[in-house]
Amino acid sequence: MTSPALDLSAVLPPPRLAQLARDWLAEDVPQFDPAGACVGSREVTATLLCKSPGSVLAGTPFFAAVFAELGCRVEWLFPEGASLGSEQVTQVARVRGPARCVLLGERSALNALARASGIATRCRHLLDTAGTAGWKGTLAGTRKTTPGFRIVEKYAMLVGGVATHRSDLSGMVMLKDNHVWACGSVTQAVRDARAVCGFSSKIEVECGSEEEGREAALAGADIVMLDNFKPQALHAAARSLKQQFPLLLIEASGGVTPDSLSQFLSPNVDVISLGCITQGCPVVDFSLKVPRPPGAGPSAPRDGLLPHTNGATSPGDRGSSPSNDIITTLSSPMSRRDFAF
């Protein structure tokens, strides 16, 4: 698990962040934004709310990059990786800028934040399971990611505390069953891969049996993945391979879920990779709310607009404020809806 003091956003190249934000906005607004003409360019302060208690906040650089492209400013009330606690509704950030720009960037920014936070939250729960069992190995994600969105999902893994595994085909050599069958044997596949990648890349071989794992180790593989093994068979094969090849890394993968993870934990298994980190992972429920301007009617929200009250708002202000009105309003069962479709 990474140090809480480590600034993970530093792994994201600023030009890449800016390009992602431009691409997302171009996809969402390819031509005109008619609704933008309705709200105009008056300065507003929108409040970002989390309505999924116990979630981990992740993806703030992507959220901020969207609004930076639109000339808006984001003030965070929690740091990246923070647990958002048990409150039904939690204020997470404030976004300031022209109304039309805040609302134009709303959905793209929320999509990235919701997806990243969902992945980070699942990662944190998986780590808790492994830590409770006293397991000392590494949990890792996979390449089962959303096309065009991988950098967000892999970054969320880092925030959640798990390893990203390889980010792409260039990052490490993984010889799967199809590679082996195309080459003719595990041994030939490893030899051919080593001739190309040299000393600078590790070679991992997906193995369906202990015998294949032994062949891969003898051929010079650095990592053996025991794929789709039942827990009991996994423990026996991993123990046998570790006895013969103490320096060999053993990875388990296939069929591991949050509910079954504890069954796969073993002192002889170094890495467990899980596709469920990105596949079927729930998103975190965020919404962005703009207060009503003075004289706009009753204080009850309608169509996602929020009551307006005068007075400054700050993270420590417990008095009447737009943010506190937002929380009071959204606590009502009839108003817990996200109108930003």
Image (tube, rainbow, N blue to C red):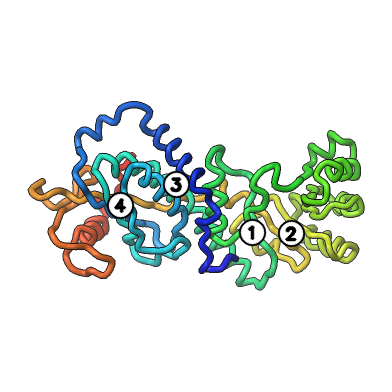
Distance Cα–Cα, label 1 vs label 3:
28 Å
Distance Cα–Cα, label 4 vs label 2:
48 Å
Say which label, 4 or 2, has the lower sequence index: 4
Q: Is residue 303 left or right of residue 238?
A: left
Q: Which residue is mark 4?
A: 95
Q: Nearer the viewer, mark 1 or mark 3?
A: 3
- Mark 1 crowd level (few <14, some 14–19, many ≥20, 10 Å Cα): few
Asked whether the beta carbons under mark 2 and mark 3 sit within 8 Å of each other, the answer is no
- Mark 3 crowd level (few <14, some 14–19, many ≥20, 10 Å Cα): many
Q: Which residue is mark 1?
A: 260
**Amino acid type at image mark 1:** Ser
Residue at the (74%, 50%) spot, across then down: 228
Q: Is residue 244 left or right of residue 78?
A: right
Distance Cα–Cα, label 4 vs label 1:
40 Å
Q: Report the disc number at residue 112.
A: 3
> Which residue is situated farthest in the top direction here?
31
